Amino acid sequence: MFSRIFGSSNTSAKPDLVNDPVGQTLYRTSVPTTVGAVSMILFYLADTWFISLLGTEELAALGFTFPATIMITYLGVGLGIGTSATVARAIGARDQEKSIEMTFAAILLGFGFGTLIVFPALASIDSIFSFMGASGETLELITRFLSMWYLGIPLFLVQFAGTAVMRASGNSRLQGKLMIMGALINAVLDPLFIFGAGPVPAFGIQGAAIATVITWVLANIFILYHLSVKENLFRFIWPGLKKLCADWVLLMKITVPAAIANMITPLATGVITATIATYGAQAVAGFGVVMRIEALVMIVVLGMSMSLPPFLSQNFGAKAFDRVRQGLAMSLKFVLVLQLGFYIIVALAAPMIAGIFSQEEEVTSVIIIILRILPASYAFQGMVILSASSFNALHAPRNALLTSLLRFFIFYVPLALIGAKVGDITGLFIGAAIGNLLSGLLITWWIARYTVSLEQRELAH
């Protein structure tokens, strides 16, 4: 059944990340992951649109949940980064047994750790969101949504680990198809559980979370089937506690700093959200919409941040440093030009975009203000994202962590807060945009210098 839906998984269709031409390889791996990422962003936008039909309170509640859900998402991204870096390096070294070991360790880590954090996440809903400014009906709606969404955390993390193995093996095309199928399933289930139909009751905002968890269940069934049967990279065989712990240590050397680095993003977003909450629920609702639009505007960056690391890791393992530098430089230049082009489109279309998600003037005005300011800096934000993922791919996770700390707590958040003091909500986003610009210039210079010094160190050994 799976082969009929997703097509053949013939490994000959996969690009050779170490030997194929750099530009062609990056294109062949980036396009499928970008298309798949588009579908996943549409997944979240579908949630936003359907929930917006319920009313402003529900949309505001969803806006409040964004830092929490994106924090878990970035935890999964961190696990995916560590999985991809370790599995891809083993594949590049032609060590099949190590690849299998690391795949098992990553999937078990995702499920086990996800299970451990479910209860603390559920128990902290009231305190965290009350601190962020939610109260009354909004807090009740947040609780209804997250009480279901949090139950799926173990499945969510397993999905990140499994798809990272697909990318590490060069099979980004299949991962893209899986993401598209997930988005389609969610789009069908969303209205069913949100508004109800036949014997299915209307769950309201909680229905969106139910649809999401069911989609994760189906995705994991396919992932485990494919990795075990088609790729021979996953086995349900206990490797022994000693070997498993050794694999976890190797994996977590990259996963933990990468996860912390990625979790800084929702933490900073939470600070910004709390500041915006002082302007009212309409401002929070507008900001929540823009955060989902941002993910769509940055979709190519997201796709490249998933496809570039396996390329860098395999070539790093093969000591092909000329390909490392060439691939990184091409990617950074492409993102700079592309995102500046996207900004022009978004700025011009801001009123139309705002009207899709809300008919309230106060909400749409906030959306328009943000869309005409913040996306101007997305090119530099994209360069930071690619630089951080490249540090992880080159097994320098502490540098990636420092990259995130620099961007958010030296530039983005402080300048946004200063801007808010000077120019209210407009000044806030002008400051945030300047923060993206300055951090992008600094960190791009750093990754370029690092790749040169890395080659010198490796060749000296």
Image (spheres, rainbow, N blue to C red):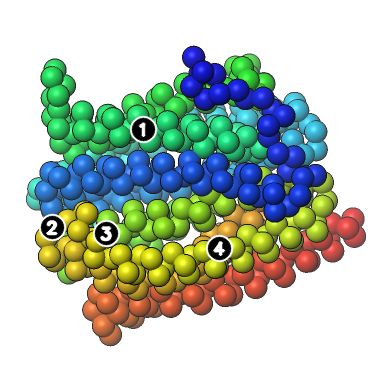
Sequence-earlier tag: 4 or 1 = 1
Amino acid tagged 2 = Gln
Amino acid tagged 4 = Val
Describe the element under mark 3 as helix, strand or loop.
helix
Asked if residue 257 is positioned above or below residue 119 in the image, the reply reads below
Q: Residue at x 14, y 32 (%)?
A: 195
Asked whether the beta carbons under mark 3 and mark 1 sit within 8 Å of each other, the answer is no
| Residue that mark 1 sits on | 184
Which image quadrant for residue 88? top right
Q: Is residue 107 left or right of residue 101?
A: left
Q: Residue at x 31, y 47 (%)?
A: 45
Along the viewing direction, whichever of 51 and 137 lies nearer the viewer:
51
| Residue that mark 4 sits on | 335
Describe the element under mark 4 as helix, strand or loop.
helix
Sequence-earlier tag: 2 or 3 = 3
Which image quadrant for residue 419? bottom left
Q: Quadrant of the C terminus?
A: bottom right
Q: Which mark is residue 353?
A: 3
Instruction: Tell me the CA gap for discs 4 and 1.
Output: 28 Å
